[in-house]
Image (cartoon, grey):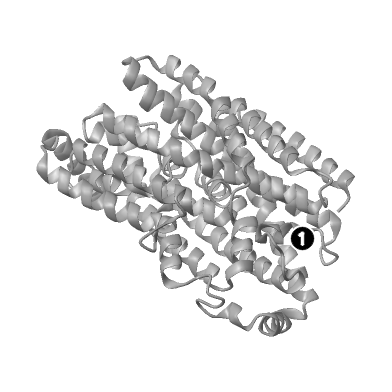
Amino acid sequence: MSTTLVWSTITIYVVIAIVIAYLSRNGRQNSMSGYFLGERKLNGFVSALSYSATTYSAFMLVGLAGLTYNGGVGALGFEIIYFMGVSLVAIFGPRFWLVGNKYGYVTPSEMLGDRYQNRWVAIVSAIASCLFLIPYSAVQLTGIGYLLQGVTNDAIPYTTGVIIATVLALVFSYIAGIRSVAWTDSLQSLIMIITSTIVVILIVNSLGGVSGFFASIEANDPQAFAVPGNGYFNFWTFLGLTIPWFFFSISNPQVSQRLFMPASLKSMRHMLMGFLVFGLIYTVVSVVWGFSASILFPGLENADLATPMLLSSEVVPPILGVIVMVGIMAAAISTIDSILLTLSSLFSRDVYRNVKGDIDDHKQLLIGKIVIPVIAVLAFLFAQLELDLIAVLSVASSAGLIVVVPAIVGTFFWKRGTAAGVIVSVTISSILVIYIEATGGLLLGLKSGIWGIVVATALFMVVSLMTQPPEQKANEFIEYVKERMRSKK
């Protein structure tokens, strides 16, 4: 793929995206709610596209394609489990939205701290999110680095791609906060879904149509349609990868924070339905890409290069390939700037405010904006390590974030849950996950995500039963949600 074509297309995309970001600057951006939640006024269409672009980032067309290349059809099962987990949004989404509007929550950690009536709950859960989300944002930078390096045959070095992504994420984050991110996400989502689908059609046709495509896979690698197939997706590996992914929609704060943003419950329903349609198409596209690369380019040392190899191949017209490349790059940037905004809001709202005292909204916003580039630099440095498969590293990050799930469930459904239960479960489980990941990713043959959810659940329940819950707040909170959910029906 011509380097000049790549740079020209990136330049055009950047100009268009910046214009859209500036056009989104209506309303107030001088408050925490305005800057980080778009004043809770996002409509269903924009919410759906933004949610999709944030969720389906470099992980899909680079990571999931690479996972399919490595492990065959088990990767499809892995992603279908995530799809099943999106059903959690139907349960928790309206509840997040209701309490967010009533109590003015800006972050999920703030919600936990208020529900359990303890500022250390907010601090501990926010710090845990920061620890595990920085590697996940680095995954997006890594995906862009591999993408630009692969499609230009090293003419654009890996580090250059990472720098471009970091700078653009900062620009979009600063222009108008979550509004600019959401509107540029919408552009990116539409580019992604249209162009990637066209590429799939071209690739499958070049392999002899649908029947020729499946026949080529059977001839190339008969184990690709079996589980565990070549052994990559054995039962415990599959379970360890899918459990964190199942809870992704409520455990990852850059995703769950978006449940505070829709203008109404109707907008949230539209967001969820739009996301499901988008996700189904994108999942099929990513898996087909992975299989296609295994047919056309067997023996790649780095499976994450499967997508760049496809886009730069003779099967895909250069202009279409470069547009898809920009779409993938844009989606990854979407996830990075969403994470930057979420982490900065967590730090200013839940850590700085609770440590320093009850500082006003404008001071919190200033601190949040100062922290954004710091987080970006940390993600950049982490991306320079070029660790492991993108898909596996994404799941490892989610394995750390999963430790807050029992506390979130308890927030809405268990009045007996206590602050001590949350603090102990999140702290010890986070340390355990970090230890497992640092020592090879397995403990007694099980991945960190399994240990994280089991240990966090056990500790949350046991410690809560041994300590005193905030009865007044628990009753008020849960009864309010029950009453509003009944009236909604």
- Report the amino acid beneath label 1: Met
Q: Is residue 452 above or below residue 182?
A: below
Identity of the residue drawn at 71% across and 32% down: 19
Q: On the image, which quarter does residue 101 sit in?
A: top left
Is there any visible trace of residue 186 in the rendered image? Answer: no
Q: Is residue 32 above or below residue 139?
A: above
- In the rendered image, residue 257, in percent from the top left (x then y), is placed at 42, 39
Q: Nearer the viewer, residue 454 or 215?
A: 454
Identity of the residue drawn at 30% across and 38% down: 99
Tag 1 residue: 309
Quarter placement of the C terminus: bottom left
The secondary structure type at the circle numbered 1 is: helix
> Quick check: 311 left or right of 142?
right
Q: In this figure, what is the number of numbered marks? A: 1
- In the rendered image, residue 10, in percent from the top left (x then y), is placed at 78, 41
Identity of the residue drawn at 58% across and 31% down: 376
Q: Nearer the viewer, residue 22 or 64?
A: 64
Is there any visible trace of residue 304 in the rendered image? Answer: yes
- In the rendered image, residue 67, in percent from the top left (x then y), is placed at 59, 63
- In the rendered image, residue 68, in percent from the top left (x then y), is placed at 60, 67
> Quick check: 462 left or right of 233?
left
